[in-house]
Amino acid sequence: MALLNRPTHQVVRVRRVSRETSTSWPGLVLAAAGALVAWSVHRLVPAVPMLTASVVLGIAVAHLPRIRTFVRGAARPGLSLAGRRLMRLGIVLLGLGLGLDQVLRLGWATVAMVVGVVAATFLGTLWLGRRLGLPGDQPLLIATGYSICGASAIGAVSEVSGSDEEDVASSVALVTLCGTLAIAVLPLFQGPLGLSDLAFGRWVGASVHDVGQVVATAQTAGPGALGEAVLVKLMRVALLAPLVAAVAFSVRARRRGVRTASGRRPAPVPLFVAGFLAAAALRATGVLPDAALEWAHTAQEALLAAALFGLGSAVHLPTLARTGGRAAVLGLGAWVVVAGVSYAGVALTV
């Protein structure tokens, strides 16, 4: 009786969620297994970030002869669900790792530098991607990944832009590849560029995409460089919420008057973005014990790893190869922009 008394769109939503859940468990189990394997790889080879391993494993599994039929068939609903829902939960928990008090200790000059790097990287990459004629939302997603925090940022923006799953997967693959290369390449430039350990750490934090990749790159210059890199990186992560909100408002403006399948207009700011901000505010109060923050970090890594495994499994290499040349040019161009602008910013503020 309670179900009958609900509005029609709520009944449809309940039925859709129930059906989605019942068909998703094979893919969710596979995503969880992929995250576990990625964690094991990271434990065995600490230089390989867990999230990077997750994407690579997802791509590999989707192309293995004996399992790819399962991945593209029975497991697809659950893997797609992991790429959306688990990504949102992971991004909310990412806010608990954002030490706003620590970030602000770097000073307003560094804050201005990071904002400038993010703006220049985002706008420059977006412009170049459109000039190169990359399809769909790839320019937007790649620009987001390079300027903020890699695959996590791509997942967040794709949620509000309604991007095609293949565009998301291709963008994640490119940004992950370039961020992984940075681990080996950037330390080679510390000496030639005359960067102190502190300056190198800030350069890494301002220019490398994923948090794990930042840690792997900066630790080569010692604990001082690592601390500076993480703080600058957290400052970039703090800009995720306003960027996603701006994209959401842009999408809302283009679709003014259009309602979703549930009969409601899309929210101006997504719920998971509000959750991210609420989590950051909660962390700033200092009421959470270290044990709780450590648990939240572990949960965040697990959720994002499962989500990125799901996104990686959507990569179709033959399709990716058709735009591979243009995507490689965009990746290289964006890399030059973010490295160059962040180096100039660090030189002016250190």
Image: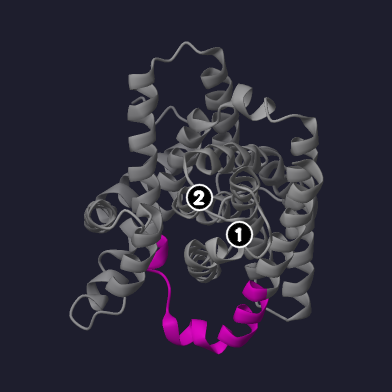
User: Residue 178 falls in which quadrant of the image?
Assistant: bottom right
* Label 2 CA crowd tier, 10 Å (few <14, some 14–19, many 20+): some
Relative side of 138 to 23, left or right: right
Q: Position of residue 238 (x, y in %)?
A: 64, 37
Give percent across and percent down for residue 348: 81, 46
Residue named by callout 1 = 190
* Magenta stretch in the rendered image: 311-332
Q: Quadrant of residue 122?
A: bottom right
Rendered-image quadrant of the N terminus: top left
SS category of the residue bearing label 1: loop
Q: Which residue is mark 2?
A: 221
Q: Is residue 327 magenta?
A: yes
Image: 320 above or below 224: below
Of 288 and 156, nearer the camera is: 288
Q: Amino acid at mark 1?
A: Gln
The reply to whether dot 1 and dot 2 touch (C-beta < 8 Å) is: yes
Dot 2 falls on a residue whose secondary structure is: helix
Going by the numbered disc 2, the residue's amino acid type is: Ala
Q: Report if residue 266 is visible in the image.
A: no
Residue 56's quadrant in the figure? bottom left
Q: Position of residue 277 (x, y in %)?
A: 60, 29
Residue 301 marker: none
Q: Is residue 262 above or below residue 315?
A: above
Instruction: Please report the residue visible at 64 percent of the width from the left and 45 percent of the height from the top.
Output: 202
